[in-house]
Amino acid sequence: MTAQTAGTTNPRALEGVDDAVAERLAAALRCATVSGTGEEADDSAHEEFVRLAAHLEASFPRVHAELELRTFGHSRLYRWAGVEPERVSAILLAHQDVVPAGGGWSHPPFAGVVDEEFIWGRGAIDDKSRLIALLEAVEGALEAGIRPRHTVYLAFGHDEEVFGDAGAVRMADHLRAADVRADLLLDEGGVVTEGVADGVRVPVASIMVGEKGYATVRLSVRELGGHSSMPGKQTAVGRIARAVARVQDRPMPLRLPPVTADMLARLRAVMPPARRVLLGAAGAAGPLITRVMAARPQTEAMVRTTTAPTVIRGGVKANVLPQHAEALINFRILPGDSVAGVLEHCHHVIRDPGVTIELAGMASEPSRTESPGPAFELVARLAREVVPGVAATSGLVPGATDSRHYDGLAATRCNFAPIVLTEADLATIHGTDERISRLNYARLIEFDRRLIEELAAGPIGEEPR
């Protein structure tokens, strides 16, 4: 193994991975494992998932010789038996699938180009880098003779981008049937950001401890139609547009949930003096704090169930009154709100019995969030070691991850990867020119290496024996 994998002193670990390590990730990026729904989508990606599986097995022979592997479709669940195998210390998640890639890339999205600074391709951040980094770290640990004190699971889903029903749901059900209860569940979601947290001048490691819920609401209207030369007082298009405007103009109320209050308390020491004073009176100043946070989309998501009209359609011709029009509005639901509450809110603000309001597709409630414990503090300490100078805090994943399917399987849930991203970098996730720097990839592997060493030393939160 190279100096960038587990079981070594890693003198160059934070200078960037070498070509051999970069190439193993690049080869995974060349597998166009685009997730989809329905048999046609599954068939089209099948060979790409088979290629990726072959690459994993060839690149990490010790992992596949020594860990127990169970497959669920293309999803892969590894069991790494501990010295004391009856207890489980960690469930480490990542996903193999990616979203489609459009045009305009500097390099073809599935070419896996490696240059002196970056490894380019769809999935470079979301989420193959985390998956391959975990295998690099475990392979190195096995070579060095390191074994966790308690059992560790690696769960690599294949359909996270389309809700995880065929992958994560089945793996989580298997773990529940085996009565698994881990100290830590670690997945994607939070990163180290620069210049994103308002007023904070140091990099912030956002270790998410839960995620918002998800619901898409369909609004639809049916009218008689006719010729546009003799319209009534309103058309289906006008009626649906008015309903969308009412929902957008009257968002759900601002709130400061406990997880957001904890996030702010952890950041208080690195905030400007005026913000520190305000946060010192968070109980009394809660409404003011939420209004300040609502000024930016990145922070508004922490204090509100967000409303995003995304689709509106109706009509077929300029001189024909439409008989049908509909719109889709996506909500990301703050803990304390619910899917039912979103529907009730839509009925309340639209106030039009002619508009049908219903859920469109899958919906999920916000995850449970608990007070950060020893496992959170371990992840925070490792983040500070791998990225010196960061301020570590908690938070909520605004989107959906496979973690939600593992609810109740671990005492502490953390969504985090120790990669440093700017706002421009964040825009490449599901966007154009997704890439990860060699330095960030080295950070991922080093973080996983150190985590494995901690799991080998003893139970999380207890002194090593």
Image (tube, helix red, strand yellow):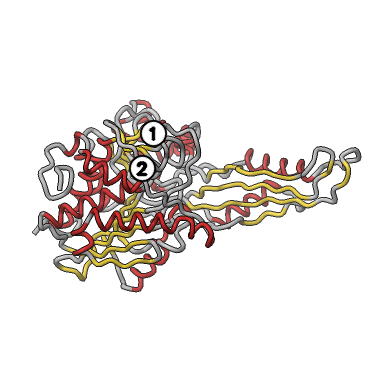
Residue 419 percent coordinates (x, y)? 30, 39
Residue at the image point whose x is 30% and y is 36% from the top: 114
Among numbered discs 1 and 2, the one appearing first in the sequence: 2
Q: Residues within 10 Å of mark 2 (few under 14, many from 20)?
A: many
Q: Which mark is residue 289?
A: none
Q: Is residue 159 above or below residue 426?
A: below
Q: Is residue 294 above or below residue 139?
A: above
Q: Nearer the viewer, residue 338 or 232?
A: 232
- Amino acid at pointer 2: Ile
Residue 23 percent coordinates (x, y)? 27, 43
The residue wearing badge 2 is: 125
In-image side of 114 versus 360 (left or right) = left
Q: Nearer the viewer, residue 460 or 149?
A: 149
In-image side of 416 versus 215 (left or right) = left
User: Would you say residue 395 is visible in this rendering?
Assistant: no
Which element is circle 2 on?
Answer: loop
Residue 222 percent coordinates (x, y)? 78, 52
Q: CA distance from mark 1 to mark 2?
A: 10 Å
Residue at the image point whose x is 31% and y is 73% from the top: 178
- Amino acid at pointer 1: Asp
Residue at the image point whose x is 41% and y is 47% from the top: 397
Q: Which mark is residue 425?
A: 1
